[in-house]
């Protein structure tokens, strides 16, 4: 925002010699400024309203206050390259008022709604004028700029007259003349019942007289009624509530004070700290966010927000804070503390975009970190980039080959990431050789996970062993469903041995569920792939091979009987096939003259 160069303009204005006045001019000065508008088309109307108010007030209050005339206002504005009829925001208005050395100035809003005009006018006191107030004025009928402006002037005139008595109250209070001071305050309130300066004067008298906190509090609350944005009133209300030990009400008062002083960053930080102490983290963050919206480059506010989010476990805003930090300063992507926290927050929120962003940065800056490579693998995994996930997990495992959990990550990525293309398989139905090659390629891909599952099967950690069993079941069932039963059989044969019951009581929990599913799929794949080894056994006339087939039939029958509840029709069909093989085994035994079974 362009800064106002009021001093330059005022240097020219100050050269004019003051005219000789026959009547002593009042010392208090009031600057009347146009009200802000929501629609740019109302700007000219706002200027006209306040021009009318200024003209009327200069006439009616000429013995009470000096109203800065329009020509002088225009000179100051033009000296700073502003047009005469510009609408100033709060900061600009305050700067102009201070450079013009006035005691008070007006700001506010002008709105149109349903054909009606409403002016919200606030008088800001910056020099002990006693005129601080806030009021709303309706447009009335006929609703012209002049009519509304003159209505505002009349109300301002009332405030000016009451403020004179409020200043007298303050003067008498400072002299210790509390009785006279209270009389002056009552005179002010007779003119303007809710004048903040009058009630504040009364509150300070109560304090000097050592009256109770509640009496002072009531007086300041009456002051806030006359100006709901009055910083002095709300700050004192907050202090009094703190004396009473009511921190939450004190915070509410400080928040009301901040509404009238939105640029007061120190106050904003203080409120946020009080809310933090009360563990009201979302509310504290909201207070700071408002400040950041007004001043995006204030590092104190941004840093405090991040602290609140971390302490209050507000994961989303923690992550947003990290993103904001590295957007402003990419060198922070080399900070391991930030990376670990950002990756953790991304994982907690399942924000795959940010997880991939921060884990990539981490792996790039720290390529020898197995943890960061695992995080990168997880990010790829969540994004469905399975091949990339396998690569990242393998890179992590290279750095620490003994990492069983890292090995399982590779296995899981392979097994879960390998999918059978049923549409392509359907196209190959008429070409038996091509279909078998297609199924074998699928099985080969899954079989590559075996070497990564093996370390977990002998791990002392039961969780690792259970995870390995799950991946074996997934691998075997996937291959079986693809129709490559001979390739599924080794997976499932090993699985049913790994999860076999340890004791008669071992019939509950996840192992039992894996045992149930594994038994079913083992039975299916065993029966569906039995023809080839059975034929080879018959041709060999080997009792050793015959025993292997006989034992396999027994285990298959037991597995199908146990796993039948997974899908009873399939299990029953497979059991019938087992019975057919069992029926011929006595003949095989007799013909081969076997004595080993």
Image (cartoon, rainbow, N blue to C red):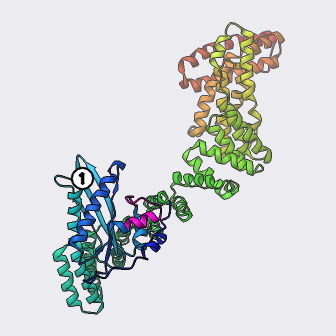
Task: Please provide the residue range marked out in magenta.
Answer: 73-88
Q: Is residue 558 visible?
A: no
- Residue 583, percent across and down? 67, 11
As drawn, 76 above or below 162: above
As drawn, 234 above or below 413: below
Q: Is residue 74 magenta?
A: yes
Left/right of residue 399 with respect to residue 244 in the rendered view: right
Q: Is residue 180 magenta?
A: no
Q: Secondary structure at mark 1?
A: strand
Q: Toward the viewer: 26 or 106?
A: 26
At a point 58% along the width and 27% down the height, the residue shown is 562
Image quadrant in which you'd find residue 506? top right
Image quadrant in which you'd find residue 246? bottom left
As drawn, 246 above or below 360: below
- Residue 19, percent across and down? 33, 79
- Residue 545, percent across and down? 80, 18
Q: Which residue is mark 1?
A: 117
- Residue 566, percent across and down? 55, 25
């Amino acid at each position: 925002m362009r800064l106002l160069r009021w001093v330059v303009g005022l240097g020219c204005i100050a050269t004019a010699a003051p005219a000789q006045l026959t009547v002593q001019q009042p010392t208090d000065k009031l600057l009347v400024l146009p009200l802000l508008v929501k629609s740019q088309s109302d700007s000219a109307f706002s200027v006209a309203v306040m021009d009318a108010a200024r003209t009327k007030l200069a006439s009616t209050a000429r013995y009470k206050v000096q109203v800065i005339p329009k020509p002088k206002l225009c000179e100051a504005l033009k000296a700073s390259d502003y047009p005469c009829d510009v609408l100033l925001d709060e900061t600009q208005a305050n700067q102009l008022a201070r450079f013009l050395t006035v005691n008070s100035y007006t700001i506010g809003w002008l709105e149109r709604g349903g054909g009606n005009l409403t002016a919200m006018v606030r008088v800001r006191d910056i020099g002990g004028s006693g005129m601080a107030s806030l009021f709303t004025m309706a447009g009335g009928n006929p609703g012209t700029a002049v009519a509304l402006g003159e209505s505002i002037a009349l109300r301002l005139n009332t405030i000016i007259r009451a403020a004179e008595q409020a200043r007298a109250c303050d003067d008498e209070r400072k002299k210790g003349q509390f009785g006279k001071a209270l009389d002056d305050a009552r005179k002010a309130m007779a003119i303007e019942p809710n004048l903040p300066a009058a009630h504040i004067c009364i509150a300070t008298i109560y304090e000097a007289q050592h009256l109770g906190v509640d009496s002072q509090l009531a007086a300041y609350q009456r002051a806030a009624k006359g100006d709901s944005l009055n910083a002095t009133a709300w700050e004192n209300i907050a202090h009094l509530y703190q004396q009473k030990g009511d921190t939450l009400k004190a915070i509410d008062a400080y928040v009301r004070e901040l509404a009238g002083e939105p640029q007061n960053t120190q106050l904003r930080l203080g409120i946020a700290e009080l809310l933090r102490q009360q563990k009201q983290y979302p509310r504290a963050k909201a207070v700071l966010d408002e400040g950041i919206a007004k001043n995006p480059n204030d590092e104190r506010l941004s840093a405090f927000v991040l602290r609140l989010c971390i302490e209050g476990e507000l994961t989303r805003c923690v992550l947003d804070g990290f993103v904001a930090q590295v957007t402003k300063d990419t060198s922070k992507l080399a900070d391991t503390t930030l990376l670990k926290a950002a990756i953790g927050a991304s994982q907690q929120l399942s924000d795959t975009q940010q997880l991939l962003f921060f884990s990539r940065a981490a792996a790039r800056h720290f390529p020898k970190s197995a943890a960061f490579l695992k995080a990168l693998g997880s990010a790829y995994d969540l994004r469905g980039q399975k091949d990339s996930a396998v690569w990242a997990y393998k890179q992590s495992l290279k750095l620490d080959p003994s990492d069983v959990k890292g090995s399982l990550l590779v296995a899981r990525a392979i097994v879960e990431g390998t999918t059978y293309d049923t549409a392509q398989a359907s196209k190959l139905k008429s070409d038996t050789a091509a279909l078998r090659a297609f199924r074998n390629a699928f099985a080969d891909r899954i079989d590559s996970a075996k070497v990564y599952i093996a370390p977990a099967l002998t791990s002392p950690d039961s969780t690792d062993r259970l995870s390995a069993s799950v991946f074996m079941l997934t691998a075997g069932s996937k291959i079986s469903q693809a129709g490559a039963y001979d390739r599924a059989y080794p997976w499932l044969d090993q699985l049913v041995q790994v999860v076999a019951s340890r004791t008669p009581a071992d019939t509950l929990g996840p192992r039992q569920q894996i045992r149930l599913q594994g038994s079913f799929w083992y039975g299916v794949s065993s029966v569906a792939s039995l023809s080839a080894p059975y034929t080879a056994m018959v041709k060999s006339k080997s009792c050793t091979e015959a025993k292997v087939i006989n034992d396999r039939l027994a285990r298959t029958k037991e597995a199908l009987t146990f796993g039948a509840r997974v899908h009873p029709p399939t299990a029953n069909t497979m059991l019938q096939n087992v019975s057919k093989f069992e029926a011929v085994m006595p003949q095989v035994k007799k013909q081969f003259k076997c004595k080993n079974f």
